[in-house]
Amino acid sequence: MKPGGPMPTRTADPRPPDKYPGRGRYPSYLAFGASGAFLMISALLLIRGVWALGDGGAAWDAYRGALGHPISLVYHGVAFIGLTWFALRLFRLFPATQPYRMGPIKRPADAVLVAGLYGVFFTVLAVGTLFLGGALL
Amino acid sequence: MSQKLKKTFIVTRFDPDKDEVPKTQTYEIEVEPDWKILDALNHIKDTVDPTLSHRWSCRMAVCGSCGMTVNGEPKLTCKDPMSDYGDTIEVAPLANFPVVRDLVVELEGFMERFQEVKPWIMVAKERAVEEGTTQQSPDELADFKQFSMCINCMLCYAACPVVSNEPDFIGPAALALGHRYNQDSRDEGAHVRNEIFRGEGGVFSCSFANECSEVCPKSVNPSGAIQQAKLGNVIDWATSFVVKRGGDVS
């Protein structure tokens, strides 16, 4: 936060926030940022799956077979923890980021917004699991 | 008569004429239990060490002058009760700002950031007096009121890790103020501010640490304002291809 021009007196250099990065609320924020990588990788895997679905039955079966590989299973286990952490922090902070009015309606109560987010999260999780498990095809 | 408490204050000192880098000095003083941190600093300056420099004014969390780092957290010292702390209290200048002397930080960079977001109502054409006052409904006021409560105390800048790591970041208070004007029904300059918001150091530099909102003493919620501005900017950018933008505003 240095000024653009020269300062009238000699100053001591700014120092970073005292608790950054290892203490206070900062580790939670850094874990949130890092878990965004799982979001990106998982989104790419999802797109790859949609692509395989469009390529026919053999490609889809190969895609599902690849998901059963031990490395893939380990990745998805770790990614699930990471994405759950990402979602928990995002859902906790989400209501405070919403405007007073959302289009024509006033902002619903925070509890309603959070319940909606969890509803979507668990629905997507259940549908995704059933779909990849073959129960919906 | 309340019983006085013994407290140890570890205060950051820096004299630009003598010191290369800031150092600390310890003061052991007796304080009243109902004192705020600022009362103790004033007591030190008045009775123990008149060379101690710190900035303060209103003593009622309105002017935003007395922001300092207390035990590692940015705080308004006039609002921060002594009872929240143990026997030892560390007081340092706000992080992320150059230190002018002791607990006093340089404000100039902060003030420059405010000017960047054009924090005033911009209109294409001034209303004539005969046209009467501009009407605004309670709902329209509520759209931005929270973001207009900022007292420029700079605690949000001191807590923000992005301010630390990205010198061009406009920062929480200034972006929240810009968003406040974008939300104002009387304003016609959102497309001008959004260009600034989308530029270098704008809203997309924010990585949602949320520290600004955590430390804000007036519940302005700069983090919320910035996330709203991000969405508003994506919509503004997308619609700019199909909807003609307003002309010159001032």
Image (cartoon, grey):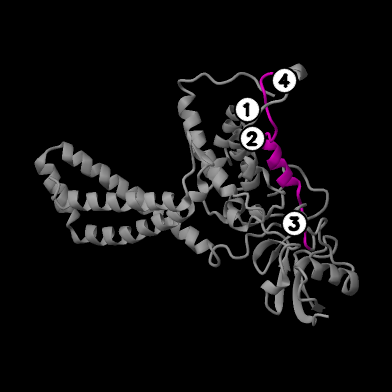
Question: Disc 3 designates what residue?
Answer: B61
Mark 2 vs mark 1, CA separation in Å: 8 Å
The three-letter amino acid code for the residue at tag 1 is Gly
Q: Are marks 3 and 1 on the same chain?
A: yes
The three-letter amino acid code for the residue at tag 3 is Ala
Where residue A41 is drawn, which disc sits there?
none
Q: Earlier in the sequence, mark 3 or mark 4?
A: 3
* B45 over A54 or under it: above or below: below
The three-letter amino acid code for the residue at tag 4 is Glu
What is the x, y in percent for residue A1? 68, 49
Q: Are marks 3 and 4 on the same chain?
A: yes
Q: Magenta span covers which residues?
A: B103-126
Chain letter of disc 2?
Answer: B
Question: Disc 2 designates what residue?
Answer: B181
Mark 3 vs mark 4, CA separation in Å: 36 Å
Residue at the (15%, 47%) spot, across then down: A136
Question: Disc 4 designates what residue?
Answer: B126
Q: Are marks 2 and 3 on the same chain?
A: yes
Q: Is residue A7 magenta?
A: no
B127 or A16, nearer to the observer: B127
- The quadrant of the image that shows the N terminus of chain B is bottom right
Neighbour tally class for label 1: few under 14, some 14-19, many 20 plus, Cα within 10 Å: many
The three-letter amino acid code for the residue at tag 2 is Tyr
Q: Are marks 4 and 1 on the same chain?
A: yes
Image marks 2 and 1: residues in contact by CB distance under 8 Å:
yes
Frontmost of labels 4 and 1 is 4
What is the x, y in percent for residue B185? 61, 30
B247 or B199, nearer to the observer: B247
Chain letter of disc 3?
Answer: B
